[in-house]
Image: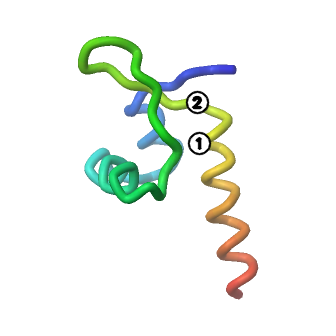
Amino acid sequence: MRIIRLKEVTHLTGLARSTVYKYLAEGKFPKSVSLGHRSIGFLESEIQEWIMARIKERDMAG
């Protein structure tokens, strides 16, 4: 299990930081993990699953 920071999440997903926060607020993105005061991370496996789900949606639509 690996925790990745927001910078790597934005790199992996291609999403802007503000979009990640928007999706978090809407419940459309994996929940963050508190790493301390004003610091969050994400489970890399959950981010990978989220990406794969987007690919699956694309493939099923087309």
Image location (x, y in percent) of residue 20: 37, 49
Q: Name the spot of residue 10 as percent of width and height, x first.
A: 42, 43
Closer to the camera in the image, 34 or 42: 34
Q: Amino acid at mark 2?
A: Leu
Q: Is residue 13 left or right of residue 6?
A: right
Vertical position of residue 54 compared to residue 13: above or below: below
* Residue type for callout 1: Ile
The residue at 44%/55% (across/down) is 27
Quadrant placement of the N terminus? top right
- Please report the residue visible at 40 percent of the width from the left and 21 percent of the height from the top: 34
- Tell me the tag on residue 36: none
Residue drawn at (67%, 60%) of the image: 53
Q: Residue furthest bottom?
A: 62
Colouring convention used in this rendered image of the protein:
rainbow
Query: Which residue matches tag 2?
Result: 43
Structural distance between the alpha carbons of marks 2 and 1: 7 Å
Q: Which mark is residue 47?
A: 1
Dividing the picture into quadrants, the one containing residue 35 is: top left
Q: To which quarter of the image does residue 22 belong?
A: bottom left
Q: Position of residue 38 (x, y in %)?
A: 25, 20
Q: Report helix, strand or loop for mark 2.
A: strand
Residue 37 % position (x, y): 26, 13
Q: Secondary structure at mark 1?
A: helix
Q: Dot 2: few (<14), some (14–19), or many (≥20) neighbours within 10 Å?
A: some
Marks 2,1: beta carbons within 8 A: yes
User: How many numbered marks are there?
Assistant: 2
Q: Is 5 situated left or right of 30 in this image?
A: left
* Quarter of the image that includes the C terminus: bottom right
Name above or below for residue 50 compared with residue 57: above
Q: Residue at x 68, y 85 (%)?
A: 61
Residue farthest top in this picture: 36
